[in-house]
Image: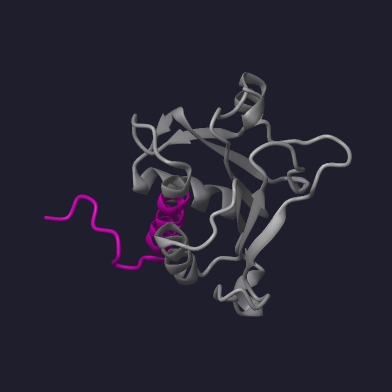
Amino acid sequence: MSGGHLAGGAGLPQATIVGEAGRGSGLVPLSPKVNEDIMLLHIIARGRIGRGPEAELVERYMKRVTWAQKISELPDTGGRVPAAPVGSRTVLLDEGGEQMSSLEFAKLLEKWRDGGVREARFCLGAADGFTPDEREGADKVIAFGRATWPHLMARAMLAEQLWRATSIVAGHPYHREGRQ
């Protein structure tokens, strides 16, 4: 399962930051007042998304997210994961992870944010997924159903779920779970 390793060795390339609010990426920056109370949503993904429909979906949904955000891309193998700040939380996306409803996911992010977590890191591994040690070291391991999803689709689905979760927390009417 070496392809799923998050940490790389010495001399390997660093992660490429492909999107960060307020840095000319097209992502919506937050006002300074809002930034003080919102944790950073950091997607750390293996592989390059390039240009295409999946990249357009990721961009479309991340533009809607009003919380601070950053996307880091790593090579399929090797590379170094950006250092985790003290008090951050790490979520691995893995087909064997817990299946959460959108409402449960939103409540988790809200609990972390309100509890003072400054960064929630969402890691998408390479083709071989994550090692048992990586799964054990994560704060949460989640799945988008029991099916195996292509890496780029999983990234787009994560972007949509982040938009949905933050809209639920904000009381926005986008989410309709349980409505008749």
Q: Answer with left or right where residue 145 lies relative to residue 113.
A: left
Quadrant including the N terminus: top right
Please name whichever residue, 132 or 164, is drawn nearer the observer in this view of the structure.
132
Q: Which residue is situated farthest in the front direction here?
A: 51
Residue 129: image quadrant is top right
Q: Is residue 116 visible?
A: no
Q: Which residue is situated farthest in the right direction here?
A: 10
Is 126 colored magenta in this rendering? Answer: no
Q: Which residue is situated farthest in the top direction here?
A: 132
Span of residues in magenta: 155-180
Residue 50: image quadrant is bottom right
Residue 74: percent from left, percent from top:
67, 47
The colour scheme applied to this rendered structure is one colour
Please name whichever residue, 158 or 113, is drawn nearer the observer in this view of the structure.
158
Q: Is residue 155 visible?
A: yes
Please name whichever residue, 70 or 156, is drawn nearer the observer in this view of the structure.
156
Magenta residues, dominant SS class = helix
Q: Residue at x 60, y 26 (%)?
A: 135
